[in-house]
Image (cartoon, rainbow, N blue to C red):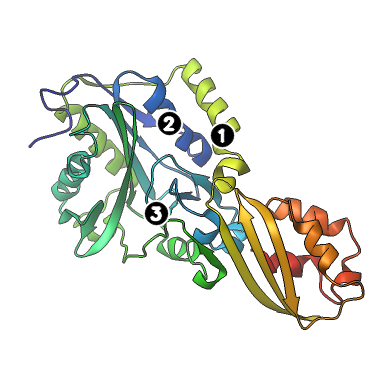
Amino acid sequence: MESAGDKGERTVMLCIYHESTDPYFNVATDEYILKHLNEDCFMLWRNDNAIIVGHYQNTLAEINYDYVKEHNIAVVRRLSGGGAVYHDLGNLNFSFTQAGTDTNLADFRKFTRPIIDVIQQLGADARFEGKNDIMIDGQKIAGNAAHIYRNKILHHGCLLFASEIRSVTEALRINPVKYVDKAVKSVPKRITNISDHLPSPISIEEFTRKIMKYVLETYPGARLYEFTEEDKEKIKKLRDEKYATYEWNYGKSPKYNFKKAIRTTGGLLEMNLDVHDGIIKGAKIYGDFFSELGVEDLEHLLTGVRHAEDELRSVLNSINLERYLHAITVDNVIQAMF
C-alpha cells in the first residue's frame, strides 16, 4: 500500500491524540500545527456539538439558526474550503499536515487511505468516491477538505461513527429562499454511521485507538507527541483572538441579501437586509402592520449594526418599538432577521 509516509517524502510524523472537545480550540489547533510545527503531523480529535463551516461559505445561510441557538451549538469557520459539517462526540475527526511539492500536496485518496484500510479491516466496505468523500453502500460516512499554506497541506476529515443523524439534518437545515448570495453552498447527501455497518460493535474510543495504531505502524518515523504548555498557550491565543470571534465565524461571510417574512399578532412582518462583511448595509421593512412613526427611522437604526442577535436586540431594546411596529415584539423582529 502506498501511504502518505512512503519513502521519498518526509520521514518524521508526530501523532497526536487531541483530548480537547472545544470546537474553537480544536479548529485553531489545525492552523497552529500547519503554521508552527515543522514536522509532519497526524491528529485525531473530537468536537462537542458544533457546525464547522467552509472557509468561503455564508455562515448564516448554512445553519438552522433557531435550532443552533436552542441547542447551544457552536459555529466555527475553518481554514479549508468545502461545505458545512455537523460535529458531535459521535464523530471522529482526523487531520494530516504534511510538506511536499505542488504536484503531490492535494491528494485526497492518499490521505484517506489509512482510514479506509482500518474501516475495511473492521468488516465494512468503505470506499473513496467522487471528489472527496468516503462512502459505505452509497452512503456518506466522511467528507474531506484541504488547505494549502506555502509548501504544506492541511488535510482533514470528519468520520461519522455514532453521530446523532437527526441533529446533523436539523442543524444544517435552512430555507434557501431566505438568502441570496454568491457563497459556496453545501450539497446534501445521504449519510450513515460507520458503527451501523460493522459486524462486531466497538466503541468510538476503540475505533480511535485502531486508527492511531495503524498510522504509527504504517508511517516511517511516526511517533506519539503531546502538546507542550507553550503549544497550548499559543493555540488558546489563536482560539480567543480568531476562531471564537464573530468577525471570523460570521463577518467573513460573503456579501448577501437576507429576506424573511413571519406572521405576528400585529400582522405580517417582512425583513429585507443587505449584509456585507457581517454588517447590515441596508434594511427595508414591509408588512401589513400599523405604525405610528413609520419604519424609515427604524431601518436607519438597523443600518450599520452587525447581523448578530445580541447587537440587534440591544438596538431594538433601546427604543419604543411599539411606536414603529404596533403589536410586534422585539422577539418577533429578531425572529424575522434570522
Image quarter where the C terminus lies is bottom right
**Amino acid type, mark 2:** Glu
- Number of marks: 3
Q: Which residue is at a point 62% across and 50% down the rendered structure image?
A: 278
Image quarter where the N terminus lies is top left
What is the x, y in percent for residue 104? Answer: 18, 34
Side of 272 where 290 appears, left or right: right
**Pointers 1 and 3 in contact (CB under 8 A)?**
no
Q: Is residue 320 above or below residue 234?
A: below
Q: Is residue 144 visible in the rendered structure shown here?
A: yes
- In whole angstroms, how far apart are the C-alphas of marks 3 and 2? 18 Å
- Check disc 3 and report the residue beneath it: 83
Q: Is residue 243 above or below residue 281?
A: above
What is the x, y in percent for residue 219? Answer: 17, 27
Secondary structure beneath dot 2 equals: helix
**Pointers 1 and 2 in contact (CB under 8 A)?**
yes
- Check disc 2 and report the residue beneath it: 31
**Pointers 3 and 2 in contact (CB under 8 A)?**
no
Q: Is residue 227 above or below residue 210?
A: above
- In whole angstroms, how far apart are the C-alphas of marks 1 and 3? 20 Å
